[in-house]
Amino acid sequence: MSRISATFQRLRSQGRKALIPFITAGDPDAAATVPLMHALVAGGADIIELGVPFSDPMADGPTIQRASERALRQGMSLRKVLALVAEFRGRDADTPVVLMGYANPVEAMGQEQFVQQASTAGADGVLVVDYPPEECADFAARLRAAGMDPIFLLAPTSTDARMAQVAEIGSGYIYYVSLRGVTGAGHLDLGEVVARIPAIRERVGMPVGVGFGIRDADSARRIGTVADAVVIGSRIIEEIESSPRDELAQRVGAFIRGIRAALDERPMAGGAPS
Amino acid sequence: MGKPDLPCSLPDARGHFGPYGGVFVAETLIPALEELRLAYEACREDAQFQAEFSYELAHYVGRPSPIYHARRWSGHLGGAQIYLKREDLNHTGAHKINNCIGQALLARRMCKPRVIAETGAGQHGVATATVAARYGMECVVYMGSEDIKRQAANVYRMKLLGAAVVPVESGSRTLKDALNEAMRDWVTNIGNTFYIIGTVAGPHPYPVMVRDFQSVIGEECVRQVPEMVGRQPDVVIACVGGGSNAMGIFHAYLGMPEVRLVGVEAAGLGLDTGRHAASLLAGRPGVLHGNRTYLLQDDDGQIIETHSISAGLDYPGVGPEHAWLKDSGRAEYVAITDDEALQAFHALCRFEGIIPALESSHALAHAAKLAPTLPRERVLLVNLSGRGDKDMHTVAEKSGIRF
């Protein structure tokens, strides 16, 4: 069983929801990333989504684009991201790491090489934002063959046919994009999310994480009543942007602890996937 | 082994030209592209839509555009005869309007009252603002703040036409960043918004749709050139940024192997300087803006900044069908430097009384190189994709003149 599936199984047995923070590797600089990852885990993160910076992050809003630009200015690259994952693994053998980014750096390295090196580094899942299922069946198969989970996005507008497609080649969990728009946008429609999640979970047969638009303990707690995981990205990047360099890990850790507490205080009834 | 794909039968049902093209976008855009694909496929087969499109091209754009024999310039060069397809005579002064009309009519069919566009130099923005005014649609144009500074006149033209011009401050603040921002608007406002992409790039169905709307250029040529010279041209030459004017003139000739097709990229300060925009000649295949194609990128797969004197060619990618035509050998691609393009610009002004766009000047410059190597009875057909009024500023500055 993959580290991701094991994590969800353990949480399920505890009646808890997964907390998945996102940070961009190399933001604000390469040396900050691994300490931030450890701080996130100490603060209660169950899985870490690690952004691979790209020059043209079309699906992201301005906050994550700024993080990408800071990281690239500091010379971050896909190879260096993989080295950071390996470094993190040196001290944490349990917390799953999902690489999240865009297709072109993967294509530039070569899919086969990327899969091999990501696996060696200790990555557990890969979400390539601009690889929809119909364009990456081979890539997803390669990831699975190497013991990694191909993670896919679903949106409020995704049809049943697409859910079936994602269920077929994806594994680990589904990242449900909770609003129409880009990362960091403000208009989360909680009612729609709550209404849609159970049906989606049933169709895909995987845990469902919800992201895009979750900004505080309250929205996290409410999403947590139906979803299996809560993904928080832009809000953490803002925390990184506003923290003095020497207090980064401490501030981000404190922020994530607040979310963790909110997620855990929820009554334990319902919502667990079958 | 199966029969190789005929270049004129592509793309496949999911928008692939061989290994290129496709739909490389986030899940949030998939339903919008699917809705667009279905709507476009219906219109493609709909005689009424096609009749409406043809009517607008004839009465609003002024088609067919003529072909002109550049006799004095050809004589001066001393070789093959150069003929110009006069897309510069279209309403708004370039080929861009053909596609904008097509997409605006489609938007109207899809009941989308709001259109958005990205623009670099402002030509596609102006064409989009023009059709939005013509059909009474709300129009928002995204433009890099660097480009806004460089293209004040076009920004004002768009505003005159009723469009809102939104400055983009991210990335390099140029065309590709404007494109990213337009995509973000689209994903947020999918219900009421149609995204008019200006070139044969982007996710399927854009490359095939824009090509189809522009292919009127080549279809006219296939009729017009024989009327003038008794046969089809020997060589068809067009500049390639994203590649819409080139696909427009090439497409009707794909099935005529005796007609050479030459695409001309921007070599900027020179291919060996790294300061150019020649994706096909100096790039590698990758994925950007929804399709797999040749891209200018670094070893890590990050997109690099490009340079060309011509803003319309200043783009790090190229339409996927050009990538396929290059690999298959059906078309050949060359590059022309800023200086060579400027020389051709001045030559056309002086010999023919035509001020060409700097984009088109790249195609002209290649014709000027090729003509003297060929006998007088050979026919070169150059797509004069736009007029050069918009480039006065750039050219004057190069000559040390400021207005």
Image (cartoon, coloured by chain):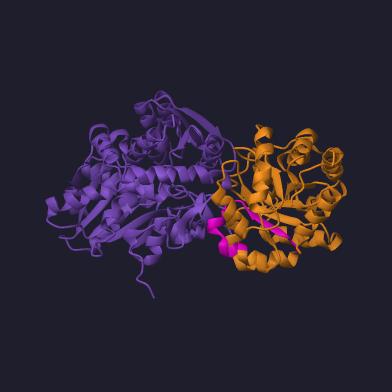
Chain colours: A orange, B purple
Residue at image position (67%, 40%) is: A212
Q: Look at the image and say whether residue B302 sits in the magenta stretch.
A: no
Q: In this view, does A266 lie to the left or right of B303?
A: right
- Quarter of the image containing the N terminus of chain A? bottom right
Find residue A97 and report its image quarter.
bottom right
Tell me: residue B367, above or below residue B65: below
Q: Which residue lies furthest to the bottom in this view?
A: B1
Tell me: residue B97, above or below residue B41: above
> In the image, residue B181 lies at what x, y percent?
55, 39
Residue at image position (30%, 54%) is: B251
> In the image, residue B278 lies at what x, y percent?
44, 55
Residue B271 seen in render: yes
Q: Which of A274 and B170 is in front in this view?
A: A274
Q: Nearer the viewer, residue B379 or A23?
A: A23
Q: Look at the image and say whether residue A126 sits in the magenta stretch.
A: yes
> In the image, residue B96 lies at what x, y percent?
35, 40
